[in-house]
Amino acid sequence: MIPKSHPRYQSLVLREIVAEGVKKGIVHITGLIAHGRGEAFDYLLGEKTQPFAIEAVKASIAYLKKAKNPVISVNGNTAILAGKDIINLARKIKAKIEVNLFHRSEERIKKIIRFLEENGGENILGLEADARIEGLKHDRAICSYDGIYSSDTVLVPLEDGDRCEALKKMGKIVITIDLNPLSRTARSADVTIVDNVVRAIPNMIKYYDEVKNPDDIIKNWDNKKNLRKALNFICKRLTELY
Ligand code: ATP
């Protein structure tokens, strides 16, 4: 039991949740490493949503409002950390949810689907395995035809760079949530929300109704410029911390 007075309480709670996810068979063991990398960047970001992340949230909503067939791709870390919010977001934006794993196993997909269903999710895709993301080898190419394959816009939190680039090559609008503004995923997506998934998804729900002019937002959106803002923020904060 982590005492609430601990200065790193929130971060330690998330760490516990992810570790519990491994025990439940929802998070792959390497998900702990991915979480650790995220934690390090969150530390540098002050563990708070920064203004550039709100701008990216609004851009992501703009693209999702224009989408004809949006899909949210969920992996183990995202499910355990933000499963309930993902379901609420999917309902709000009328998106399908597909469980899609880098380290694919049918058993883990089933566990994640069950976990999402326990949190109110319905018709969750992921087990069909009837299509492939073009240009990728091995199991990480496998996806659902009715989900990611036929989508026009995909929200892929905590994605791997290769897959993000492959989705872009298939002509999709790719929105990601990644605490690391330097990752290949962050740099190849159309919209990168540099924030923790536990804050970014609730913010997407919160700001959804506020976005009334998606065409204007998309016209003025520059993802690289927003990533530079994130990096500048980190650099400035580092020089001011000591
Ligand atoms: P890439 O292949 O895109 O360069 P990578 O190899 O650095 O990425 P992966 O291990 O594939 O990264 O994916 C983990 C990514 O998810 C990391 O960039 C990490 O910062 C980010 N991440 C981890 N936990 C969270 C979280 N809770 N919220 C947002 N991002 C996170």
Image (tube, grey):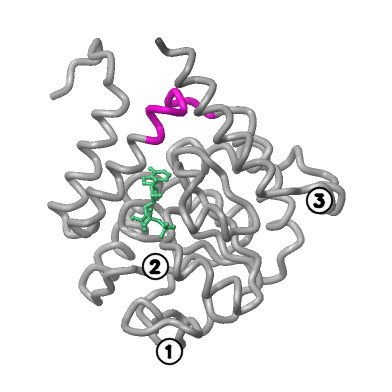
Mark 1–mark 3 distance (CA, rounded to whole Å): 33 Å
Find residue 129 and report its horizontal and vertical position in percent: 38, 85
Find residue 26 and report its horizontal and vertical position in percent: 23, 58
* Residue under label 2: 99
Confirm whether residue 123 shows in the render: no
Ligand 1 within 8 Å of the CB at mark 3: no
Whether residue 48 is in magenta: the answer is yes
Confirm whether residue 58 shows in the render: yes
Mark 2–mark 3 distance (CA, rounded to whole Å): 28 Å
* Residue under label 3: 214
Q: Point out the stretch of residues depicted in magenta.
A: 41-49
Q: Disc 1, disc 3: CB below 8 Å?
A: no
**Where, by quadrant of the figure, is residue 110 drawn?**
bottom left
Whether residue 142 is in magenta: the answer is no
Rendered residue at 45%/69% (across/down): 162
Of the pair 30 and 120, the residue shown nearer to us: 30
User: Tag 2: Cα neighbours inside 10 Å, few (<14), some, or many (≥20)?
Assistant: many
**Up-down relation of residue 48 to residue 78 (above or below):** above
* Label annotation for residue 130: 1
Horizontally, residue 32 falls left or right of residue 57, namely left
**Mark closer to the chain start, 2 or 1:** 2
Find residue 72 and report its horizontal and vertical position in percent: 52, 62
Q: Amino acid at mark 2?
A: Val
Of the pair 91 and 177, the residue shown nearer to us: 177
Rendered residue at 85%/46% (across/down): 213
Name the quadrant of the C terminus. top left
Of the pair 3 and 157, the residue shown nearer to us: 157
Q: Amino acid at mark 1?
A: Asp
